[in-house]
Each structure stands twice: as structure tokens, then as C-alpha cells.
Image (cartoon, rainbow, N blue to C red):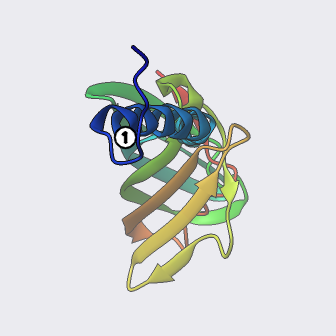
Amino acid sequence: MTKILHPDDNESTTTRRQLMGGLGAMLLLPLAAGVAEASAAAGNSGRISFRITRAGLIVGLGGGTGTLSFNGKKYPLSIGGVSLGATIGIASADFVGKVRHLRRASDIAGTYSAVGAGLAAAGGGAVARLRNSRGVELEVSGKQVGFMASIDLSGLRIRLA
């Protein structure tokens, strides 16, 4: 005996729901893959802290050390390339902040340049947004101690120690 399905029949409704659910999943799969890919491309974020000391009489030299906190681990950093221009004085500055767009810890390495307005100083403190060639961005704030006009973070070089 042949069974004739009616639109109100539960078996027919269930089959249509399954078909529509499968079709919907197939349509959403590329979207979900795109979101996952965009998220991976954006990378993860971490925290950074570093101390820079700069001294000079006519020619200034600067450098320091720091720590990257990323994916539950801490990585020691070596800092260099800090404003090697003409200067008189000695100063130290401690910076802390966020690191964005890291895929792996080694992406932190590189030379950084100012993003947007660069370094803004206010009452002995400074805020800077910097980016390296791998697209890693630092957003740091810090306070300078000592006698020197400023510590310029443009040209900052970071490497894993």
C-alpha cells in the first residue's frame, strides 16, 4: 500500500525540517570558515612591559629590557634603537601596555614606528601606538624619570632575549 503524505503529516514536516536544516548548514559553513580565518588573521593579544634607559651628551644612546606575556607564558625581551639623536641628560622610563595581532611570540620582534599621532606626553607620562612590519601593534603608556626632554619610541627595536 502506498502512503500519501499530506502537508500536515508529521513525517513530511520532519523531512522538510531536516532538508532545510541541512541546506542552512551548507550555506552557513563558508561564513563560519571566513569568520574563523579572519579571527586567525587578526591574531591574539598579549601584554608588554619594558624599561628603557637613555643617556647622552651630544649623542644619545638608549635601550632596555622587558617582558611579553602571551598565551599564558612570559618571554624576556631586549629593547634597542631608542632615539639615537643629539641629547643631553639621563632618563629612564617604564612602559606597560597591550600587544595586538600576535600569531606567535616571535612576531613581537622588529622595528616599530609610530601609528597615527605617535607619542603624546602629559604630565611626565606618555602614551604611544606603534606598529612593526608584521602588523603587531603596541599601545603603551609610561612615565619618565630623570632629566631629558623626551624619550622618542619611534625606531624602537624589540627582539626576544
Note whether residue 41 is visible. no
Q: Nearer the viewer, residue 106 or 88?
A: 106
Q: Quadrant of residue 67?
A: top left
Residue pictured at 37% horizontal, 40% vertical: 13
The residue positioned 56% from the left and 35% from the top of the image is 23
SS of the residue at dot 1? helix
**Residue type, mark 1 in image:** Thr
Look at the image and tell me in which quarter the N terminus lies.
top left
Residue depicted at 36% across the width and 25% down the height: 75
Residue furthest to the bottom: 123
Observer-nearest residue: 19 or 147?
19
In the picture shown, does residue 91 fall above or below 66? Answer: below
Q: Residue 147, how many percent across, how many down?
A: 44, 71
- In the rendered structure, the answer to whether residue 108 lies left or right of residue 123 reads right
- Residue 40: image quadrant is top right
Q: Is residue 99 above or below residue 134?
A: below
Res 42 quadrant in image: top right
Residue 76 higher or lower than 6, as above or below = above
Residue 103 position in % (x across, y down): 53, 30
Q: Which residue is mark 1?
A: 13
* Whether residue 19 can be seen here: yes
